[in-house]
Image (cartoon, coloured by chain):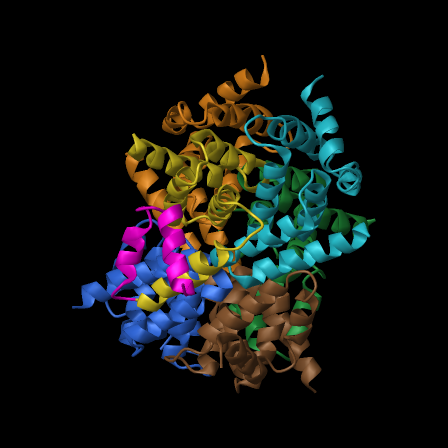
Chain colours: A green, B orange, C cyan, D brown, E yellow, F blue
């Protein structure tokens, strides 16, 4: 399997259907970006040893919360966090842990994104 | 035990000596900030259930890497990460996982902070 | 009065009804975050001496403008700024003062948030 | 011609109609901000030698992508980039070049803003 | 008086000697940037009505704290804050007020910058 | 040639000796990060068509200026900008163009980084 195929396999395992609209939307305007995310993101980074999928998603939602303005990507990875086995409680706790480091506003934004994703689960 | 005492106990367990100069330096200029970090940071947040100390430090070093310009705090928490049992490899892997989300420059800054802390260990 | 009660009292004075939907929305997903904002934010920080409410709101809307991506929180605190006695002119002037430090885009976002809040006043 | 007149002329050349709603919306709430953008932004900065309009717009969309949360301003300047002669391909390539420096999320946000602007062109 | 002259006068009043090395250092590499800061920053923005110098410096140090990585500029404006009459206590309180909005790390950086400036006063 | 070899070739052309200490310093702590920068950064991104090296470096120094806290990487790419043929004047003008978008502080930081690099040239 080449990196793109590995990436597709990891993408399916981790994101399930959640990232599909993103990849779909890139097709006509920036197909190479699509390939980079598959090869570099999911084929290389998510394929590394040393951290399991739960830890990787915990790191991902933390960095997205901290950056701000990445609510679309955050929602995809909140869904991915659930897919790999993080509980709703662990996701919210991850966000609450960030309060002393980034303050309440970014944390509130993330919690409300989680609320949307969790609602879509039921 | 009140929150400040809980905070002091957690601080000792997690940060060991690493945060001491920070608290020392605040004493004369902003002693209340000192108390807030103890009561709110270490007495409230780090005292919560739902995530263990390793997970909490992994989240902390991720949010500090992402913000940028927090190298002092990052070094304290890289040391704290080692104290609670994360390995050097796991810390570096946490940083590498952030590349697709924040790019190389912030990750390089964090890795070089880790290098300094790891060197001080030996 | 404990800190939470002080926080509730300060919240009522400062934010009036503006923050209520935020607190309401947190209830089921992260009630502890609710309490932290009351105890630490409104019960501790807003209860300190040394700056009056107008100064505190001026600082708050400045830090929210600067972070970017916090338009929801900014609108709440633009309303709070009016509640504690800042004029519409002073709020806009606060934003304009930030231009040399953060550039036009973040300032424009804040001014348009103010425009929405001011319109709701009439 | 004073700086404001120079600014108006440059604005017309560069942004065409794209920035008009922004200036219109500022009229009642912050007319001075309007003048500053004309005099300082378009009358001073865009009037300088040393870089041509294509280079200036390339720099502008890069800094807006990097900041995050400036999608409104980014859309105006993606349109401006087309107006001064950058191709759709060059705009997307500018964004893709940022991936190693800021990561995928901010780049995706910019690419989707471009997609909206390009769609409005046809 | 033209804007540059107004700017020079305001600069002298507000920053005193603190900004001088900055302007000196720019002379050979970017003299126009020098003029822009004088004309736009100190000649236009700091010359506006609606907020007094103390309020303007309070806003300035808040936006610089929030951005991060602007310690050089922050130190200049902490000195300027003292020059226009803010007390050391008000400056530190301004920083502490930011904790719930940006978290402890950025606030700690600002407090330590203040500590350096205050030490130089004595 | 595989991607890593392409990356090494591009690195030599673009960065010359400037990036060498970075790659050297990563060797023992995070050699994989080294490879990623070569394969993904210099082997993939810098190897794409659609923009020339001067444009790519102009975009790079803009995104680094905007992020803040990336002075190390900025100095490497200011040197790289000179290597691929941008003049000192064009580099400074790129930074000045950013003033209306990010404000003076980040621009000043970048200009002072340029001053250091330019001084090392002579």
Q: Is residue F68 left or right of residue D70?
A: left
Q: Is residue C76 left or right of residue D109?
A: right
What residue do we see at 43% from left, 54% from top?
A: B106
Tell me which secondary structure the magenta stretch mostly adopts.
helix
Point out the stretch of residues depicted in magenta: E1-29
Rendered location of residue E41, percent (x, y): 44, 58
Asked if residue F14 shows in the view, the reply is no
Rendering quarter of residue C52: top right
Asked if residue F92 shows in the view, the reply is yes
Residue B69, above or below C110 = above
Please, which residue is most extreme toward the front here? Answer: E1
Please, which residue is most extreme toward the left here? Answer: F122
Please, which residue is most extreme toward the top here? Answer: B1
| A10 or D97, nearer to the observer | D97
Residue D60, above or below C116 = below
Q: Is residue C69 left or right of residue B24?
A: right
Rendering quarter of residue D81: bottom right
Rendered location of residue A28, percent (x, y): 64, 80
Rendered location of residue B63, percent (x, y): 52, 45
Rendering quarter of residue D24: bottom right
| B102 or E60, nearer to the observer | E60
Q: Quadrant of the N terminus of chain A?
A: bottom right
Residue E18: within the magenta? yes
| E48 or C109, nearer to the observer | E48
Residue C65: within the magenta? no
What residue do we see at 53% from left, 77% from top?
A: D7
């Amino acid at each position: 399997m080449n990196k793109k195929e590995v990436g597709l396999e990891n993408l399916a395992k981790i994101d399930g259907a959640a990232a599909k609209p993103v990849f779909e939307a890139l097709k006509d305007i920036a197909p190479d970006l699509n390939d980079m995310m598959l090869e570099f993101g999911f084929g290389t980074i998510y394929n590394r040893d040393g951290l399991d999928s739960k830890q990787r998603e915990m790191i991902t939602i933390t960095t997205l919360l901290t950056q701000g303005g990445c609510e679309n990507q955050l929602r995809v990875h909140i869904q991915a966090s659930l897919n790999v086995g993080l509980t709703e409680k662990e996701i919210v706790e991850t966000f609450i842990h960030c309060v002393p480091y980034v303050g309440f506003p970014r944390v509130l934004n993330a919690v409300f994104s989680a609320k949307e994703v969790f609602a879509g689960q039921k």
